[in-house]
Image (spheres, rainbow, N blue to C red):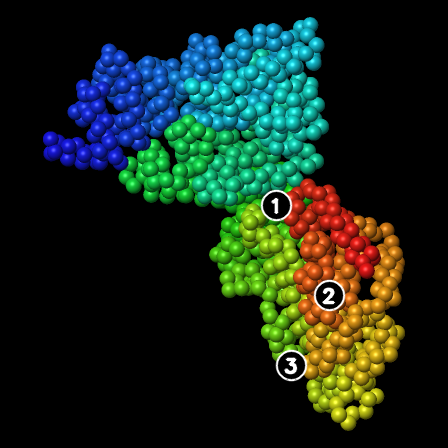
Amino acid sequence: MQGRRSSTFTRLLRHGFTDPAAAERLLDAPELSAVRADPVLLEALGATADPDQALLGLVRLAEALDSEERRALLDTVTTAKPLRDRLLGVLGASEALGDHLARHPADWHALVTYEAADLHPGVAEFERGLAAAADPDALRAAYRRCLLGIAARDVCGTSDLVRTAAELADLATATLRAALAIASAETPQDAAAARLAVIGMGKCGGHELNYVSDVDVIFVAEPADGVEEVEAVRAATRLAARMMRVCSDTTAEGTIWPVDANLRPEGKNGPLVRTLSSHLAYYARWAKTWEFQALLKARPVAGDPALGAEYVAAIRPLVWQAAEREHFVTDVQQMRRRVVDNIPAAQVERELKLGPGGLRDVEFAVQLLQLVHGRTDSSLRSGTTLTALAELAAGGYVGRADAASLDDAYRFLRLMEHRIQLHKMRRTHLVPDDEAGLRRLGRGLGFRSEPVANLNREWKRHAMEVRRLHEKLFYRPLLESVAQLGTDDVRLSTDAARQRLQALGYADPAAAMRHLEALASGVSRKAAIQRTLLPVLLGWFADSADPDAGLLGFRKVSDALGLTPWYLRLLRDEGAAAQRLARVLSSGRMAPDLLLRAPEAVAVLGSVDGGLVPREHAALEQEVLAAVGRADGPEQAIAAVRGVRRRELFRTAAADLIDTYGDDVEAAEDRVDPAVLVDRVGCAVFGVTAATVAGALRAAVNAVTGNDARPLPTRFAVIGMGRFGGRELGYGSDADVLFVHEPHDGVDQAEAGKAALAVADEMRRLLQIPTADPPLLVDADLRPEGKSGPLVRSLASYAAYYRRWSLVWESQALLRAIPVAGDQDLGARFIELIDPLRYPADGLDEEAVREIRRLKARMESERLPRGADRTTHAKLGRGGLSDVEWTVQLLQLQHAGRLPELRTTGTRRALTAAAGAGLLDPADAAVLDEAWVLATRVRNAVMLVRGRPGDTFPGDGRELAAVGRYLGFPPGHVGDMLEDYRRRTRRARAVVERLFYEGA
């Protein structure tokens, strides 16, 4: 006995059982006594997806049968291979269908025969199989009985994926008809009052249904003769609702599937049933592009066939005109993002449908290409994904090899989905994360040896192929249409290529075609690499607000660097570099302009050792001063300084853009907090500007002294003011400064002053030499007496002026003063001089507070440009930079004398300190901080997009959209962006009114 058991145990292991002990007990069950020793049975069980599950299901079925039926079952199992394979295959693949057979044991007879109709049943055959079902529970049981045959053909391989999906759709059609018949029988008066047609949508409409999926439908109704329309629609609505419940209610017989009518006009908020004219009125006026995308698959499935056909005939022309709609490009971009946005982050790695390289990638790509090209090519209008893909390949819209790879991958992924759903008959698209589930799935797909490892390898291979082809599918044929390649593949016509470019957001498809031709034509290695890069780059450009600018910029950079050996190699071999370049080139004018004047700076995009990290101020200053020291004259020196500035501004702008959008164009989770970005940009631009000022100062001193031939008779320092001193510079900010000098011992004051003025004048002259770079205006208007006062003063002169004449606005301006260049000791003593002024020990008296408020009110009424919108002006408008900064600075003037933590030149740091000291509510501080960050980002965005400074949102639509993208708003949402800006700044202004104008 022990020997027999040991031998059986070993055989069970060899045949794939994971619990041989339990399997031995099941084989010893009295119900299987007649076949226990039959070697054919064990062999057949071992061929199933889950031998343990198959054996358990067989025992349960045998237990449920009477002795005569059990004998018939077991005789057939051991002698008829077709039944054995089908029955055990279903039991091993589906626990749920095993449960059904245990409840309805007589249904095993549905698997016995192999008639011609059984091999390829259609709607008529399934209707006959459901005909006897007079109530919902009977329909559910009959549905599962029909499903047994579909599953058996599937797991035994007598039906391929396409045939199985079509049979499931046909069964769904027959089931909807039967459910409608049951509903009509329950309420005959409703059925008589209206003609109701059920339109299949989604995978049901596309004839490619899953085992367990929502069955998407739309209902359309018309009144029966003599019935008012309102009453007819009400009756049809009751009938439709009952039909849905028949299918989706859960009882002891389980459920069939949910019927989902949310693709109807207005979705859940719209009426369940509409007349045909109501449908058409909605589609003509209100429908979005995704709704026409959904209608690609519409077909009548139940109810009044004439009305269904009339509906489809009426909506078909609207579907194929969708690509001509005004907002088609924006809608397409939103649809493409919806594929990614719908991915639950915690499940993305196991998502077959929505994950990267998933089923949705294939389906979306095919449907979008159908919408673009199907308006002029009626051969592309199939609702079935794989049929449509084959049609696109036959028409030359997709490369044949690409279509074959995509077809293969799609079939594999759908088969995975079928096997996963079949197990429990549950709607899921998640790959199992347990070993047993993965093993069953792998075996169900034919991997008998190492099923888990082989499954994972094949799944990842197909997913990677789908992801690669998802990008390539759109863009590769565009290149083949212009590259004049010797290829056997059919190329897109010029018109088709332009259609596709226009659909992807290119405003000037003809120009885009010329750029592609210039980049990709020919047989050179350079052209070959470009043809590899461009399909992906075109997609990244299309994700931006200005694809045309991105492509044009890429052509210009490629023209400038195309002959350098490292450029294309960098883009080809460093995936991040190409993606970063696409982002930078298509996000506005400033960064591409900087890059085109120094194309070699593209190398920073590929650096893996911090190439995009802003360089420290000290290192930049050292580099600049060394370059000035090597120059032959002041003009050459300032050119070298500007070269460093250009490179570093590009580095900063590129890092800002990449961090704003995420290193992966589609990965929103990679994006950096906007406040962190503002601080990072402010510090980086400060460092660049301070180094530039230091270099200009050294060049000016060299010019005045003849390279130290005549030593400068005075010490000289530059004090940063305003946003410069606060380390809060934007891309378009001026550099506010004060110039201070101090004569060397024994030097005449007049001589020292003359030399200091010469240095300041020469420094400003050098920085004002015309250049194509973003200008750096050195503004010294915050000096004593403003424009009327001397440009440069000695430290003693400043002390005398501040002691006798200083006004409260000057104390306020000095809050942000820091030394930025020149003599460090002199700069430090200047700060010692002004500290008592900007941090008064006793704070401000009431008159000083009133004066600051008067100045602010006067500035608001006089300095806002004529015609500017006060609600959206980032600097002087309501809740803008000025509001926040004046409020913070008033608190500093009042309290920094006694609270050292307020002694900072940065607005955000001062806000944090004020809240920490209890001078304002943390909630108010958060509102002010949010508004200040937002206004700063608006100014930065305008400079990045337009290439010139601005305090207001652009008027041009594309530029406004680009600003919106920088601020985190998707295409088509500029109105939301403006409303969001107004809302946040309105809240900030309310805080300013309370703290600045009403505070004690």
Q: Which of the labelled discs sits on residue 629, or is there none?
A: 3
* Residue beneath the point at 68% across and 41% down: 972
Identify whether 359 is placed above or below 746.
above
Q: Amino acid at mark 1?
A: Ala
Amino acid at pointer 3? Gly
Q: Tell whether label 1 touches label 3 (CB within 8 Å).
A: no
In the visual, does 604 lie left or right of 251? right
Front residue (pair 372, 798): 798
The first of marks 3 and 2 along the sequence is: 3
State which tag comes first along the sequence, 1 or 2. Answer: 1
Residue position marked by numbered label 1 in the rendering: 542
Mark 3 and mark 1 lie on one chain; the one further toward the N terminus is 1
How many dots with numbers? 3
Could you classify mark 2 by the number of other residues whose Cα lies within 10 Å: few (under 14), some (14-19), or many (20 or more)?
Answer: many
Residue 675 versus residue 387 in the image, above or below: below
- The residue at the point 63 percent across, 23 percent down is 315
Q: Badges 3 and 2: C-beta atoms under 8 Å apart?
A: no
Amino acid type shown at disc 2:
Arg
Residue 988 visible at all: yes
Circle 1 packing at 10 Å, graded few (<14), some (14-19), many (20+), is: many
Spatial CA span between label 3 and label 1: 46 Å
Question: x%, y% of residue 843?
Answer: 79, 69
- Residue 845 screen position, x and y as percent: 84, 68
Instruction: Indicate the position of residue 185 as horizontal and vertical percent values.
Output: 54, 8
Image quadrant occupied by the C terminus: bottom right
| Residue 770 visible within the image | no
Query: CA separation, marks 1 and 2?
Result: 36 Å
Dividing the picture into quadrants, the one containing residue 42 is top left
In the rendering, which numbered label is found on residue 723?
Answer: 2
Of all residues shown, which one is farthest toward the bottom? Answer: 746
